[in-house]
Amino acid sequence: MNLRSPTLPSEWIDRTQPIQFTFEGKSYSGYAGDTITSALWAAGQSVLGRSFKYHRPRGILSLANHDINTLMQAGQQHNLRADVTPIVEGMQLTAVNTWGGVDRDRARLINQFSAFLPVGFYYKAFLDKVSFPFWEKVIRTMTGLGKVDFTTPRISTPKRYDFCDLLVVGAGPSGLSAALAAAERGADVVIVDENARAGGSGGYHYGTITQTANLLAAVAQHPQIRLYTDTTAAGYYADFWIPLVNPDYMVKMRAKSMIVASGAYEQPAVFRNNDLPGVMLASAGQRLLYRYAVKPAERVVILTANSDGYRAAIDMAKHDVTVAAVLDWRDRPSNSDLVAKVESFDIPVLTGHCFYEAIPNSSGDRVAAVIACPVDTEGNPQPERRQRIECDGVLVSVGWSPAANLLYQAGTKMRFDLELEQYVPEVLPPGIFACGRVNGVYDFAQKLLDGQRAGLAAATNLGLGSAETIAIAPASESPTHPYPIVAHPKGKNFVDFDEDLQLKDFHHAIQEGFDNIELLKRYSTVGMGPSQGRHSNMNAIRILARSLGKTPAEVGTTTARPFFHPVPISHLAGRSFLPERFTPLHQLHQDLGAVFMLAGQWRRPEYYRPPARNPASPLSPPELGDFKSGSPQNWEATALGGFPDLKQVAWARGAKDHSCKEFYVQPNQSREQCIQAEVNAVRQQVGLIDVGTLGKLELRREQCIQAEVNAVRQQVGLIDVGTLGKLELRGPAAAEFLERVYGGRYANLKVGISRYALMLDEAGVVIDDGVIARLGAEHFYSTTTTSGAAAVYRELSRLNTIWQLDCGIVNLTGARSAVNLAGPQAQCVLAKLTSLDLSGTAFPYLGVREGLVAGIPALLMRVGFVGEWGYEIHVAAEYGPALWSALIEAGAKVGIRPFGVEAQRLLRLEKGHLIIGQDTDGLTTPREAGLNWAIKLDKPFFVGLRSLQVLAKQPLKQKLVGFRLPQDFASTPPQECCLVIEGTEIAGRVTSIAFSPTLDHYIGLAYVKPELNLGDRFSIRTPEGSLVTATVCPTPFYDPESLRQKVEAAQPEAERSALKGRRVSPLHGLSSDDKTGQITIADLSSRPRFGVKGSGAAAWLASLLLPIPDRPNTWLPLDQDSLIARLGLNEYLIESESAWTKFIANQNFPVQVYPVLRQDAAIALSGPAVNELLLQTCNINFQVLNLAERPLVITTMVGVTVQVIPITVNGEVTYRIWCDGTFGPYLYQTLLKVAHDLGAPDIQPIHKLVKETP
Amino acid sequence: MKLMTCPVNGTRPISEFICGGELRPMPDPNQVDDETWADYVFHRNGAAGIKAEWWCHTPSNTWFVAERNTQIDQVLRTYLYGQEEQS
């Protein structure tokens, strides 16, 4: 059977491009523009899928994605909706959920047993512990749509933002008319339509095609309108935030108003065998014909209850389809002109008739006849007067249901209109409008008017023009039959085609007491299939209403939730932005073999695996090793000879345990060549292979850490502490502010001295700690924990917003690099690099000094966190690498070693120092943690004081103590968070525990009952369940008298190098591909810049003869390429060589002027695709900014805080972007990746090492 | 995604903001009894209604006050702390 029509002017197919594909192993051909369904239907394939429950053959129902009769799989793409999926050359399709193919699905036998699958089957089956596992197994085998191919590659789907004034959902006649009306008033309009082409019902309705084409032409030419086809508005979220889903990606549209012109879903009539292939909705037949030039059948019978069915009859008759009869369910058709027109084609019109059932052909794969019968005055069928009408197709047009999902989600109040037999909007939320069928308007001319009305109303709402009244004529007929449902003693009259729900299922459910629409939905699962009730909800409401003797309005509707339509997981997962922070020393750590760990957003060295040296090795140096994961350093453990297959040793073992080196990379050699060379070396000379990693990875990590600990205890170590929060406070009230915020006393702190600082919340709970250093009478520098930095700065800002004290807080966390040089040799190493007097008397423990280290301006603090003589050295981030390298070089002779976070944890534990957040929790008070020494309860006020006063009257519930395990303890040790057990009760928990190589036994900290004293014993339960006895012992475990802070190292002869620190860009060393292309990214980090903030900043800058932007978040150009930008109310960023020179010369800042060290990663973005790059990375509409006003935007881009200035250079817009240098690498590389996806970017050379210290 | 208007930086998606909780004046710690203080520290009024809340535009670290009808989740107005009359 070939159902393809001759060429039609309206068709979407391109007959010059035939396309071959297979379905269920058979070859088919169609044309470009065909969907899978249209191509198969044209070839006479009527069974396109099998139903979910009874495996009944199914064909076309809606051809509009309102049903899932035709779900198919093509390789890794599953659950393709064949009705709307275009065919592609070579596509190999199968129907889902069949046992042995769609034509002879063995599971069709279930159809015979439908009586044993009653409504609520799941609830009835899963009754007890015996039936649950049985039925679960059966149902899991029987059900499921499509098969997941786990080899499907990960796809990084782009996501993008977009913006418009007005979003019109639906490009049918009313939507197009609305868009034009609003755009004419000046609105920026976007129209989306889920179909491949716009036009909606205007493209396939008799008499409306030309007018619709004219509308489309007008829209296409309108500069204010963007039309996106193949795009679904998948949901409505607050403030006009609408995900638009197209086949390739998701757009997060932010509109200012929305018009829903989404039309209506045609509703099936319910009669026996209404699901037979060949029985379809009339609109489906029209779409098939007009869009794809495919006839629904050779000879059709039409069942209708409105004018649409008559129009369909005319469409069919005009295109060579025999219409055997038109049956009108109504006694009296409303439009006699249409009746006459139909009858002029010699088509019999039987009024007051309906279908009793459809009859399948002998093979059961298509309709062969219908049984029609008259209805009584109530509309009920009278089967005793039935007649048979032969046909091979049936078109049904008995009613519509509004596609109101988005309206519901936006909070529209709907009412059931008894004239229309349809829900229509009653109260629309502000900014939301509806027109066309969803608004109950069906006549073509009235739809255009209704669209115009909605478009003008939306424009008025946007402030474009004034309100106009447009009257819409009331409908001349109800387009919907009030009860298009026919009972049949043999059933199989389907209401829900997804879930195979028959009429009787509803009656049974209602009888069983599920007589509320929400209960009925959940019990029967109506509307819960993939088509979400588009074709079934309304009939379900009618059945329930009639059963209860109520109106549909009284029954109500179920809740419509996003998404409107299934959205692929790949679209939702999409490209995600998870910023990572790198300290300025990151590359140096990498070079040193650091193994990194995540600390919040930071990547920190957990420990270092230094490259091993083995001079005897004939192989390449292991530094060049290409590690699969982990790395073999245990070169002492050599073993060679006797390997049966050396090739296997060379590489297969790596694959086996993923811990060994695969091979050693040689320059300019392929992998195979490298491996062969290794094999040859062993065969002919001698080879060396690491076998030390076998099952010993954990130990090896411990070895690295212990070596680092030993270095700090015995020689000297260096750790990157740049992740600490670093704040600078200036102003007459800075001391007062700190007194209020922290528990200790800072007003009496001497200049040049630091003091431990403990921060509490209002409940008296410890939330953060750090060190506060006094640099001047009104100048403090404080550190916070790594994890607390952002929150502490934010909270301090909030507190001073309330207190209004005369001081300013500057967050230097990312702008400063910091290292801790610690160990007996620290003094001696540092002395080589600075002229500061480092003697214990001149620079005592807790002292703070400012001076040059290796020629770099630095702040030095004598600290003792790890329990050794140590200096925390803070410098501008750009000098961090130079400082680190200088220290490593200076310490080389005394065995300096970088140490990581793990070694530091052990060192501080030996010293009994707490880590806030590890040794404290969200309820810990200073008294419990033994930190009362750090707070001064006699101060008049600090945050948390009042609560501590209350708590002081209450008995202590627990306390933190040090403990040790017996010297000979050798089994599995307890871990952090293991419980302290007393009898059978929990009596506390371990917060820290580690083996101390210095003390040669396990030490730890634990919360225990306050009654325990030094020397008392308590039990800890290990992860295996056994109890270990621990002894309470004093802390610090190591060096309790802090003698290490007093023993000075022999000061070497000062051999201070005249090193000059080199500045390094935060983007130093990042890969740079260069290609001509759509995007240019330039690194401008090296430009001189500084910041100032505070209420006196503007006046002070003016005194440097700089112009001041008069509005917040604007900027002014300075000489050459430089500029001054105002960030918010009182902060300024100046990027200018000459201004910077003045700034450096003027370091005396008056009150209320606070300098801000700027160590930004600064980039410039430009190129033809720059807008697209911004839309994919930043939720800001830069297109609407007026560049003449010189705007500056402070926002986030790829999750990173940025300051952005669009600058017009030679007519092209360049975006200058600044961000915290520690986020720079992430921002830069992420932009680069997106740019690559958009087309090859042109990356200007990275400025690697910039200039010498001035 | 909801929008929020920062008095300095303008209207932005709410992902750029954090909420700092209801604006609650601290009672004078030297005057109140323990129970009143505990009530201030630990108790929050969850009843729906119009509330003044602390919000912070995090990219610019701008704290401000938002008056929000928590029953319908509608922001009525926003202003910088202490500048209520100018809003």
Image (cartoon, coloured by chain):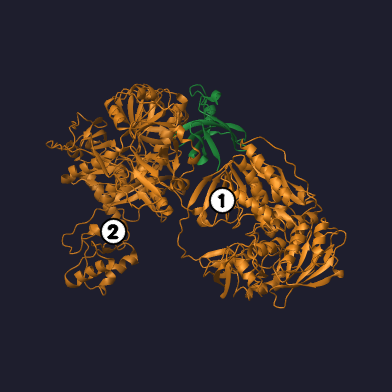
Real-space Cα separation, disc 2 to disc 1, in angstroms: 47 Å
- Of the pair A935 and A551, the residue shown nearer to us: A551
Residue lying at the far left of the rendered structure = A1053
Residue lying at the far bottom of the rendered structure = A362
For the N terminus of chain A, give its image quadrant.
bottom right
In the rendered structure, the residue with mark 1 lies on which chain? Answer: A
Q: Quadrant of residue A86?
A: bottom right
- Of the pair A1176 and A641, the residue shown nearer to us: A1176
Residue A551 placed where, x, y %? 79, 51
Task: Identify the mark nearer the N-term, 2 or 1.
Answer: 1
Q: Residue, x 69% and y 77% (percent of image)? A: A363
- Describe residue A216's horizontal placement relative to residue A1000 as left or right: right
Q: Residue, x 63% and y 76% (percent of image)? A: A104
Amino acid type of the residue tagged 2 in the rendering: Ser
Q: Quadrant of residue A126?
A: bottom right
Res A631 label: 2
In the rendered structure, the residue with mark 2 lies on which chain? Answer: A
Letter of the chain shown green in the rendering = B
Amino acid type of the residue tagged 1 in the rendering: Leu
SS category of the residue bearing label 2: loop
SS category of the residue bearing label 1: strand
Res A244 label: 1
Residue A773 placed where, x, y %? 31, 30
- Of the pair A1187 and A1160, the residue shown nearer to us: A1187
The reply to the same-chain question for discs 2 and 1 is yes
Classify A752 as above or below A450: above
Question: Callout 1: few (<14), some (14-19), or many (20+) C-alpha neighbours within 10 Å?
Answer: many
Q: Quadrant of residue A850?
A: top left
The colour chain A appears in is: orange
- Describe residue A903's horizontal placement relative to residue A1020 as left or right: left
